[in-house]
Image (cartoon, grey):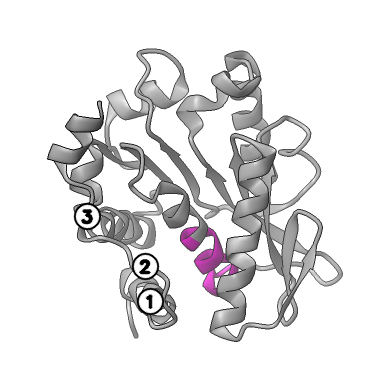
Amino acid sequence: MSTLREHFFEFDDALAEHGVPPLTSWWREGVGTWLDAYESAHALELVACVGRGAAKSTVLYKLALFFAVFGDFAVPPGERHYAIVLSRLKEEAGKGIAIIDRWLTLLGIPHRLAGDAVELAQQQRGIRVVAASVAAASGWRAFFVGKDERSKWSETGVEEREGEEIDVSAGAMTATHALAPVVSFGSAYYAVGPFFDAVQAGSDEHRVVLGPTPTWIAAPHVTEESTRKKE
């Protein structure tokens, strides 16, 4: 039987066969380390602080879809539970759901679009990608929560106090799934707020922290020289 790390890499390879760029070696090592800790010790949180252009959203969508299709979560008859991704903006959320819809089509997995969600046809599961708000993080049962650009929520009309309320509400969505992962990615490294605190604290028995890492390390096709020239 393959490990969770191996299974995720097989999933990533299957997408790559259809032209979807695979994870870089930095992402594979980091996500693989977390999946090992999740599988062996139930480390539920993954936090990554990485430079812009390093495919953070793409990796987050892949993890959400992987856990939606292959995760070991029980959903009671008549209910539908979700992998929920909280984005900075409504426009980013719309882009994300379109990407996931396309990936499911490429993999031949039956599904249907339903507003801001993709629902799996043969499972009582789905993926929602929505703009971060208390309302968006309420009223649903979730077996996976992803937070895209968590460090920038305060820049997009989500006050930091509300951001913390969203964190609490998002955690409550997972109440019926003890092993629901919570994944938070961001690029800006402000010296304030929950994301900064998590990165500063580093990895422990409950959480794996990746970074801070510059773009050219996580995404080697973007060179340090070109990045510094642009700056």
Q: At label 3, which amino acid type do we have?
A: His
Asked where in the image residue 37 lies, by quadrant, the reply is bottom left
Q: Which residue is mark 3?
A: 221
Q: Where the N terminus falls, by quadrant?
A: bottom left
Q: Earlier in the sequence, mark 3 or mark 2?
A: 2
Q: Which residue is mark 2?
A: 21
Mark 3 and mark 2: span between their CA atoms? 12 Å
The answer to the question of whether label 1 and label 2 lie on touching residues, with beta carbons closer than 8 A, is yes
The relative height of residue 90 versus residue 192 in the rendered view (above or below) is below
Describe the element under mark 2 as helix, strand or loop: loop
The answer to the question of whether label 1 and label 3 lie on touching residues, with beta carbons closer than 8 A, is no
Find residue 199 and name its label.
Answer: none
State the residue in front, 211 or 178. 211
Q: Residue at x 37, y 62 (%)?
A: 39
Residue 75 falls left or right of residue 231: right
The residue stretch that appears in magenta: 62-73
Find residue 16 and name its label.
Answer: 1
Q: Is residue 204 magenta?
A: no
Residue 143 falls left or right of residue 189: right
Instruction: Please tell me how many numbered marks the rendered image carries.
Output: 3
Mark 1 and mark 3: span between their CA atoms? 17 Å
State the residue in front, 79 or 145. 145
